[in-house]
Image (spheres, rainbow, N blue to C red):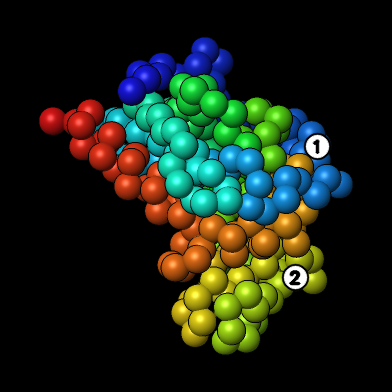
């Protein structure tokens, strides 16, 4: 487990954080398809908090994309680096997530975030932020649609419906299990939306949520328990 300090110069106010988002958003790459599903590595990242003790734990779990077997995993624990502000959650998570990724013994490949990429009020959620900082292909797979609207996808697995901000498609509602509530997929960096949905389906052979999310969620919660009284 890696212990993380808040980086020098890390944003301390909403105004500073929004300025960083504005600066980095222009670096998001949207014209690359990304790696083919089922090839190489795919890595899930997730975080857990203990606000009472000012602790955040991050986990990164690398899977073989073809078999979904665990290849490697790493955790990092640090102080919570930003207050809770909707739309700025990445600033609470990025330092420890980066440390967990850095601690991996192998390349992560595609990174899957439990959250949002372009499906974000400022079009720069955690998946986009992490992708720009690392250069890695990233996608966001969220459990709810945040502030956006969508029509319910058809019942069969693999059905989709646009996730909309007005008339703008910022992601897709994707049915990963027949007749089960969809997940909400958005591009982070260096991956197309079609490919992001294909990866999500490849990562959900049995359950609604991707195996990357399920495994990293379990690991970060365990790391948080180990790190707090």
In the image, 51 versus 180, the foreground residue is 180
Nearer the N terminus, badge 2 or badge 1?
Answer: 1
Q: Residue at the spot x=79%, y=71% of the render?
A: 167
Can you name the residue that lies furthest to the left here? 229
Q: Tag 1's secondary structure?
A: loop
Question: To which residue does mark 1 refer?
Answer: 26
In the image, 144 versus 207, the foreground residue is 207
Please state the horizontal and vertical placement of residue 213, each as a whole percent of the image: 45, 51
Q: Residue at the spot x=50%, y=16% of the render?
A: 7
Q: Could one spot residue 124 in this view of the protein? A: no
Q: Tag 2's secondary structure?
A: loop
| Residue 29 picture quarter | top right
Q: CA distance from mark 2 to mark 1?
A: 22 Å
Can you name the residue that lies furthest to the front here? 67
Name the quarter where the C terminus is drawn: top left
| Residue 80 picture quarter | top left
């Amino acid at each position: 487990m890696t212990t993380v300090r808040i980086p020098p110069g890390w944003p301390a106010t909403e105004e500073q954080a929004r300025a960083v988002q504005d600066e980095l958003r222009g670096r998001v790459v949207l014209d690359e398809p990304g790696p083919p599903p089922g090839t190489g590595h795919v890595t899930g990242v997730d975080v857990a908090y203990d606000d009472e003790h000012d602790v955040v734990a991050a986990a990164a779990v690398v899977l073989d994309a073809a078999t979904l077997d665990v290849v490697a995993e790493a955790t990092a624990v640090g102080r919570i680096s930003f207050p809770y502000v909707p739309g700025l959650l990445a600033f609470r998570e990025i330092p420890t997530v980066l440390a967990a990724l850095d601690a991996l013994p192998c390349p992560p490949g595609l990174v899957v975030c439990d959250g949002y990429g372009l499906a974000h009020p400022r079009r720069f959620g955690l998946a986009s932020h992490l992708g720009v900082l690392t250069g890695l292909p990233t996608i966001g797979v969220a459990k709810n649609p945040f502030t956006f609207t969508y029509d319910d996808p058809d019942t069969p697995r693999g059905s989709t419906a646009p996730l909309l901000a007005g008339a703008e498609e910022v992601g897709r509602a994707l049915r990963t299990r027949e007749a089960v509530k969809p997940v909400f997929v958005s591009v982070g960096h260096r991956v197309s939306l079609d490919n992001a949905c294909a990866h999500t389906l490849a990562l959900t052979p049995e359950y609604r949520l991707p195996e990357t999310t399920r495994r990293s969620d379990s690991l970060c919660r365990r790391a948080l328990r180990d790190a707090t009284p």
